[in-house]
Image: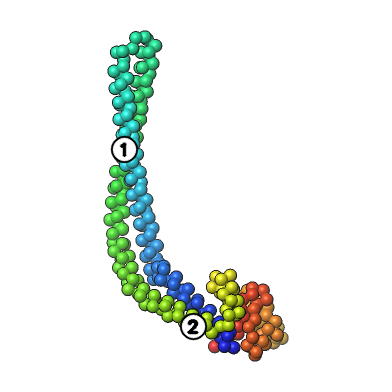
Amino acid sequence: MTATLQAIVALHKTLTELKAATERLDSIPDWMQELHQEHSQRKAEIEQVEGEGVAAEQQRRAAEAEASDAQQLLARYQTQLGAVSTQREYSALLTEIDSAKEHIRTAEQRALDALEGHEQAQQKLGELEAGFRELDERYQAELGKWEDEKPAVAFSIEELRARSEKLRAEVPRNFLLLFDRIYERYHGRALARVRETAVARGNTMWHCEVCSYNVRPQIVIEIRTHHKLNQCESCKRILYWEDDE
């Protein structure tokens, strides 16, 4: 393998490790995933019930305010009864009074329903929080362990970044541009290993490890013997040869 291709392979490996380490630092480690999922689900359930309680309280206040306004309107209508001079005006005012009373009744019922909903939400919230407490304590303890591990992961990220910059300096600019273009296109997988497959009558075929496209024998010779940089004719990834251990 030429120094250029060797540097590209090493760079690709380093960038893969860097990406994995960065993702690990920005996420929850595997050993915490199950606990994290349970904690998140239980917390989301608590937040939902809290939201239901807040909404019920808002509905109660709105209904009580609506009932209060209707009561004031009713009082005004009742005061006006003594001032009407015709039967038609009297009948119309009685209709308004009945409407106001009905409005008060429905508003008070909504306020009562909302109060009941708020109390139920508070009761359920208390039960959920009591059950969540022990889980949260375990989660915070495991989270503390992960926080203790983070500095080492962050240090390895800096080492990998420094190594990748050093390797990039070893790759000629034209090959580096090619590598970066393929790396970006395939979101981090710019290389493909040439794999050997035995076929009938002892013959051998070669293919791209990623897309399985056949690699011509001439290309295999150029990669294995002359260490030339070649791309897969299908997916355009950079091909390399690596002997099986």
Judge by depth and name the residue closer to the eye, 199 or 147. Answer: 147
Residue hosting label 1 = 61
Relative to 158, does residue 202 appear above or below in the rendering?
Answer: below
Judge by depth and name the residue closer to the eye, 87 or 211. Answer: 87
- The x, y position of residue 225, in whole percent, is 65, 90
The mark lying in front, picked from 1 and 2, is: 2
Disc 1 + disc 2, Cβ < 8 Å: no
Q: Is residue 147 visible?
A: yes
Please tell me which residue is depicted at 64% across the width and 86% down the height of the picture.
228
Please tell me which residue is depicted at 36% across the width and 13% down the height of the picture.
90
Residue hosting label 2 = 166
Which residue type carries mark 1?
Answer: Arg
Q: Residues within 10 Å of mark 1 (few under 14, many from 20)?
A: some
Please tell me which residue is depicted at 35% across the width and 57% down the height of the picture.
43
Q: Residues within 10 Å of mark 2 (few under 14, many from 20)?
A: few
Relative to 170, does residue 48 appear above or below in the rendering?
Answer: above
| Quarter of the figure with residue 119 | top left
- The x, y position of residue 238, in whole percent, is 61, 79
| Quarter of the figure with residue 93 | top left
- The x, y position of residue 158, in whole percent, is 42, 78
